[in-house]
Amino acid sequence: MPIATVNPATGELIRSYDALGEEETERRITAAHTTFQQYRTTPFEQRAAWLNRAADLLETDRDTIARTMTLEMGKPVTAARAEAAKCAKAMRWYAAHAERLLADEHPDPDDVQDSGASRALVRYRPLGVVLAVMPWNFPLWQVVRFAAPALMAGNTGLLKHASNVPQTALYLEDLFHRAGFPAGCFRTLLIGSGAVEAVLRDPRVAAATLTGSEPAGRAVAATAGDEIKKTVLELGGSDPYLVLPSADVEKAAATAVTARVQNNGQSCIAAKRFIVHADVYDTFAEHFTAGMRALTVGDPLEETTDIGPLSSEQGRTDLEELVDDAVERGATVLCGGARPDKLDGGLENGWFYNPTVLAGITPAMRIHREETFGPVATLYRVADLDEAVHLANDTPFGLSSNVWTRDAGERERCARDLEAGGVFFNGMTASHPALPFGGIKRSGYGRELAGHGIREFCNATTLWYGPEDS
Ligand SMILES: O=CCCC(=O)O
């Protein structure tokens, strides 16, 4: 895939870049590694000052970088601005809390004594250079979610961003540099995916984090496994959205629309499978379908647009194939199911797809098991909570889940039995700096954000002091 900005709303090539050669890649790895030797000893206070400065700069740049993101991957510009604001918030959160999250841990004194020590503690030390392989769907946020904790922990980062968001990738390098971080702390590598393995195998690279597709995750994990290097993987999701009889059904339906189409439907934590109790199915289906039908599809640079194009032509083809397969096998199209036919002014060449609701899904359809990365929802009718939980778990993925109910017993059951990294009650899944984020099963492993995220790329070092040190 060329490293280039191609406007998904028009198909127009805006800017392309040559991939870095081996020599320049090597220089950047060296810079990240050399910088780490010094940077690891900088006080938290200094790191926090730089990170807060990065947040200030990002807020100043918000409108420009939002426009760049929209031109690179097609999200509505309103969502792009919100993404920039969320990144600034996460930077400030880690600047404020990293020192506390990484404070020395002191085991129980009886256990310390039992170990033969006069004292013992755990200290979180940085690991070194971390390679971040990141996707285009939240081109700022996915990177900041890694970079803010990594930099606060004293690590340095190398970014291999998706090939369709090179301007955002370069912006991030510039941002951290302008904020005052030493030059090698955060470097962007404009390289193709074929060059990732060599970087990961470099002995100076300590670990990797990847957000993206299952095949990409498997490839990075295989190489990292071969090199015995730590990885965190955040892969796909096909999150269930359960609506049970005691729910506020109209509210559940309105939220379901946002949960499905956020980011043009291209979010790993978007709700994708809507599993609705028979008692409230018809009401939910009616409101949900009306909400999906009412969305405005169009130019993502317009303030009033709800749904922009998919990020690539291939992405739209993949989505269309899933819908077509389901329809051929008997699914009912409640709305959408096709490309919009009324776009003009260049937008007719963009990779748009109408918000779609499909009902009557069966296990024979690909869409039952595969992730829909676009504004397409599948609707299931279930007889009771047992069937709902069974269906929710009948997926290779386990990222997050959503449950609408006012019944405390049902909430407890779902908190216990849903196979996912998160269960969100009476609301939609959203990431927050203070809450751990990540999945199980084919959705990956490890956690980002919160204390869990910052500690993933730390060496939890046991410090044990014998009696002579007492
Ligand atoms: O694609 C993953 C979702 C990212 C997020 O919203 O934190």
Image (cartoon, helix red, strand yellow):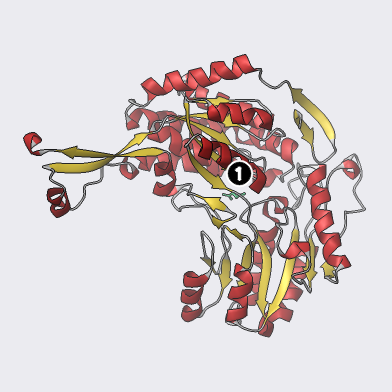
The residue at the point 47 percent across, 37 percent down is: 228
At which x and y percent is residue 109? 14, 51
Q: Amino acid at mark 1?
A: Gly
Q: Is the residue 432 above or below the residue 147 in the image?
A: below
The residue at the point 52 percent across, 40 percent down is: 225
Whether residue 451 sits left or right of residue 388 in the image: it is: left
Q: Residues within 10 Å of mark 1 (few under 14, many from 20)?
A: many
Residue identifier under label 1: 217
Q: Is the residue 457 above or below the residue 338 in the image?
A: above
Q: Is the residue 225 above or below the residue 289 in the image?
A: above
Inspect this view and state whether residue 344 appears: yes
Whether residue 9 sits left or right of residue 155 in the image: it is: right
At which x and y percent is residue 9? 82, 41
Q: Is the residue 77 above or below the residue 366 in the image?
A: above
At which x and y percent is residue 193? 67, 32
Quadrant for residue 17, please give it: top right
Q: Of residues 442 and 58, which is closer to you in this image?
A: 442
